[in-house]
Image (tube, rainbow, N blue to C red):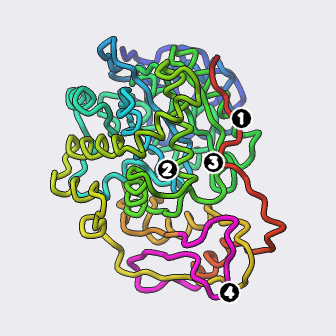
Amino acid sequence: MSHTPSRSSFPEMIMKKRDGGQLSADEIQDFIDGVTSENMQKSQIGAMLMAIWQKGMVPEETMELTKRMMMSGEVFTWPKEWVMVDKHSTGGVGDKISLILAPALAACGCKVPMISGRGLGHTGGTLDKLESIPGFKINLTSDKIKQTLQDVGCCIVGQTDALVPADRTLYALRDITSTVDSVPLITASIISKKAAETLNALVLDVKCGKAALCKDQKDAQILAKSLVTVGNSLGIKTGAVLTRMDAPIGRCVGHTLEVYESLECLKGRGPDDLRNLVITLGGCLLHMSGQSATLADGKKAISDVLMNKKALQKFQAMLEAQGVNAEISQALCSEKAEYFKYLQPAEYQTEFMAQDEGTVLSLDGMVLADVLHKLGAGRSKAGEKINHRVGAELLVGLGQPIKKGQAWIRIHHDDAELSSQQQHELEGALNIGSAASYQDSPRVIEFLLPN
């Protein structure tokens, strides 16, 4: 498949894009071949990423880049009767939806070959969260993925070496070259992996707000339209849901704590906003893939498998299929689980008290993510180790009354003390005011679903 770039040299291609030119299909093929064959130097790839970030791409370029990335490695094939679905989120704070949604969809009869990523920028990665469960293996062979889908119905894995190798290189370099927030690069990265999964339906959770890549709704709409257009043009029924990302999702942030909260949701408990997002996104997929007649029917089906514990059973089976000892998986999935007997707790817990009394008007998820990142929950460069134990529990919710001196957050950390800067930042993340000035903002803003 690979061919030696003959039409243009790498510096010429970089210059053309830097100066705002449109890359041809052949040039994009040369770029992707250069990335996968390692004929292109890392500095040249970084320069091309920056040129794309600065000048953007027209839809044809984005489409071509996505297709070439998809074809840079293996493309899955499945039995015809399988209904293949997946979801992708553009990343948020406390976004643990995948851990709950994949088994819920499997419990509804779908197959979910969820290929996930590690933390990128300030957002936590689904794989990092699952690796806080002792024994969980994210690297499965293609055969093992197929076997797990046959037996369980879902798996959550890292990219195999053979799957979209071009993206693995670009994904790591985007993080360290500050080119994460580019619409063409985000689109190509997400859709190339999902297209290689050979899906019937895909839903995209496009976040907007303070703690999202897209800070405002207009930017989120542009990204959602790009993703939906490219997905549908590659033959996947693709829809998007725009969701608000200012305050964290649920009450827990941080890898181990988010696993604990996901398990609570799978047991029919847990925070309403988390549960509602799972039900909404799952309902979209069931409807788009023809598994339910209406969106409302799809939402009800997802709600039912959370309440009757069928999704929990699938989660337990997935854990065991992916290397977790049966004793641990059973203990975690039991009704009265002693979570922190099996999930590692942090050494210290520090609670912060409210400085005023009134109503919780807002909680700044971005501030929280930044502090936790510095405490070891995130990466500054690709391949860095992270601390799964670091995290935060919100002890109050939006719109709730709060008293002066009441604990509003509990930080789980392994450094003996938080710095005065970190304490100051955290105190600024909580906004208290009068009940009259509280505005309830629903998480779901807009649907962009195919007809």
Q: Is residue 414 magenta?
A: yes
Taking depth in this image into account, of 158 and 237 the one nearest to the observer is 237
Q: Which residue is mark 1?
A: 221
Element at label 3: loop
Relative height, residue 120 to residue 386 (above, below): above
Q: Earlier in the sequence, mark 1 or mark 4?
A: 1
Taking depth in this image into account, of 428 and 300 the one nearest to the observer is 300
Q: Which residues are magenta?
A: 394-420
- Asked if the residues shown at circle 3 and circle 1 are in contact, with their CB atoms under 8 angstroms apart, the answer is no
227 horizontally vs 112: left or right: right
Q: Nearer the viewer, mark 3 or mark 1?
A: 1
Q: Is residue 63 magenta?
A: no
288 horizontally vs 448: left or right: left
Q: Which mark is residue 120?
A: 2
The crowd level at tag 2 (other Cα within 10 Å; few <14, some 14-19, many 20+) is: many
Residue 105: horizontal and vertical position, in percent?
Answer: 41, 33
